[in-house]
């Protein structure tokens, strides 16, 4: 009899298998990605558990972007497919993660192929270097949050926290990846994401930033309730929306 825990991780196995398969059989690999994403939603989603709505949204984006990529990526040779699918693999590891170490591993699996995608797609390396610079700033802060959590709890698991310090440090790291205030002032995110192929750009904007929101939400649920933190996060969101709107108006003009 097959262990239920093994079945739970089948989508993760399928998406990682699709990466080497895509080098020779691109269309089949994208179909595997669609199957993996559908299975991921089916296995993990629970309407009574709000955190699993992140799984459903992510899986839906992966399905749509993978279907779109079947025809779109034909003009990009063999390099785009494995990088695209490896980025999804990293995101799935993040969503499956049960501790900081696995989360950080997924964070890097997601980020490095995304950086390579931008670098290979653009003759000017500046956009790729900017992308990697802010990605690694993000990783440094998340690792710092993990170390702090270990100091407070004695392990790297996602445990109940007695203060907001881990949440604040983790949030700074996630904000860097998401391009929120104050990191959005450099306009790095639209520059970097806009330098990627359309399917990868959609993946970055829709789900890579969502991984930051997911991480913040996960740590916030483990942290003490704080009205001050709530006001701070609301202020960051409002300022980011204002600056984002101004940027959109400016770019349109």
Image (cartoon, helix red, strand yellow):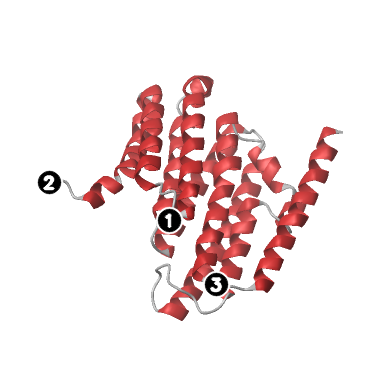
Label 3 SS: helix
Which quadrant of the figure has residue 192?
top right
Q: Are there few (<14), some (14-19), or many (20+) residues within 10 Å of tag 2?
A: few
Which of the two marks, 2 or 3, is nearer to us in this view?
2
Q: Are marks 2 and 3 in contact (CB under 8 Å)?
A: no
| Residue at 64% in and 33% down | 123
Label 2 SS: loop
Who comes first in sequence, dot 1 or dot 3?
1
Towards the viewer: 195 or 60: 60
Q: Are marks 1 and 2 in contact (CB under 8 Å)?
A: no
Q: Which residue is mark 2?
A: 1
Q: What is the distance, in whole Å, between disc 2 and disc 3 at their CAs?
A: 41 Å
Q: Are there few (<14), some (14-19), or many (20+) residues within 10 Å of tag 1?
A: some
Who comes first in sequence, dot 2 or dot 3?
2
Q: Which residue is mark 1?
A: 105
**Which labelled disc corresponds to residue 166?**
3
Q: How many numbered dots are placed on residues in this image?
A: 3
Return the x and y of residue 113 as percentages of the image width and height. Answer: 49, 42
Q: Are marks 1 and 3 in contact (CB under 8 Å)?
A: no
| Residue at 57% in and 57% down | 136
């Amino acid at each position: 009899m097959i262990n239920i825990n093994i079945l739970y991780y089948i989508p993760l196995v399928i998406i990682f298998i699709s990466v080497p398969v895509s080098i020779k059989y691109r269309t089949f690999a994208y179909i595997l990605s669609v199957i993996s994403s559908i299975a991921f939603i089916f296995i993990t989603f629970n309407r009574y558990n709000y955190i699993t709505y992140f799984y459903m949204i992510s899986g839906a984006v992966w399905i749509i972007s993978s279907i779109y990529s079947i025809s779109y990526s034909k003009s990009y040779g063999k390099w785009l497919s494995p990088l695209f699918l490896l980025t999804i693999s990293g995101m799935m590891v993040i969503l499956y993660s049960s501790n900081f170490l696995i989360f950080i591993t997924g964070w890097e699996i997601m980020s490095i192929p995304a950086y390579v995608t931008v670098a290979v797609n653009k003759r000017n390396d500046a956009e790729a270097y900017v992308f990697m610079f802010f990605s690694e700033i993000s990783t440094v802060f998340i690792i710092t949050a993990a170390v702090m959590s270990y100091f407070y709890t004695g392990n790297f698991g996602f445990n109940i926290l007695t203060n907001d310090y881990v949440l604040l440090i983790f949030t700074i790291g996630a904000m860097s990846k998401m391009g929120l205030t104050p990191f959005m002032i450099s306009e790095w995110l639209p520059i970097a994401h806009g330098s990627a192929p359309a399917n990868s750009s959609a993946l970055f904007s829709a789900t890579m930033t969502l991984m930051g929101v997911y991480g913040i939400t996960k740590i916030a649920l483990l942290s003490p309730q704080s009205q001050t933190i709530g006001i701070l996060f609301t202020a960051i969101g409002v300022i980011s929306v204002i600056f984002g709107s101004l940027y959109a108006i400016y770019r349109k003009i």
